[in-house]
Image (cartoon, helix red, strand yellow):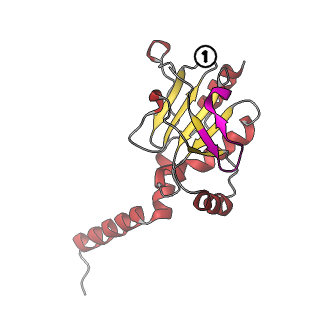
Amino acid sequence: MKFTKKTIYNSVFVVIIGLLLYPPTKVYFIRLISFSPSTIKVEKREQLTSYNWNLKGLNTASIDFNQVKNKVVFVSFWATWCPPCRAEMPNIQELYNDYKDKVEFVFVSSEDWSVISDFYKKNNYRLPTYNPLSKRPEQFNSETIPATFIVDKKGAIVMEKKGPANWNSAKVRSLLDTLIK
């Protein structure tokens, strides 16, 4: 069999597409191209109009979202089956490890705890996770996951990203340090 340039290029193309469709490679590739999210300009920040939202704690106590009022809050909507969600989880876990005593972290999924628990055990994640019991604040509505928001002490959404991001970046850490003060 004679190999032409066209045959070699086509073979390489098929292998690359196959790797991108293979879930572990897909997650790794998404992680490589995920950047730090941008801070929202002050004049464009949305204010939470309501904190009335009940969440059932899966690996933590259940909360009424009113309990996080006047605190810096990191809210993430995600699922175990979502490759972009899985891609950003290691960075989020690192951020959580360093800021869990200073920032309220709220990870929201509609999946059963058994599914999430298996995923957490496999990956050594320890993120406080909740199922929604009531309608979330309107400002958190999103058609996609992951959808992540950082809320300041006054209830303004200062950072928002729909899609994967590097949440353990210097930019995010600097923002959190500023908001905590």
Residue 46's x, y, as percent? 47, 19
Front one among 128 and 147? 128
Q: Quadrant of residue 153?
A: top right
From the viewer's perspective, is 167 left or right of 7? right
Magenta stretch: residue 65 in it? yes
Residue name at image x 63 percent, y 33 percent: 64
**Where does the C terminus fall, quadrant-wise?**
top right
The three-letter amino acid code for the residue at tag 1 is: Lys
Residue located farthest toward the right when viewing the structure as drawn: 101
Magenta stretch: residue 10 in it? no
Residue name at image x 68 percent, y 33 percent: 104
Residue name at image x 61 percent, y 21 percent: 152
The magenta-colored residue range is 55-67
Q: Secondary structure at mark 1?
A: loop
Residue occupied by mark 1? 154
Residue name at image x 65 percent, y 50 percent: 58
Residue located farthest toward the bottom when viewing the structure as drawn: 1
**Where does the N terminus fall, quadrant-wise?**
bottom left
Q: Residues within 10 Å of mark 1 (few under 14, many from 20)?
A: few
From the viewer's perspective, is 63 left or right of 16? right
| 137 shown above or below 6 | above
Q: Quadrant of residue 75?
A: top right
Q: How many marks?
A: 1
| 101 shown above or below 130 | above
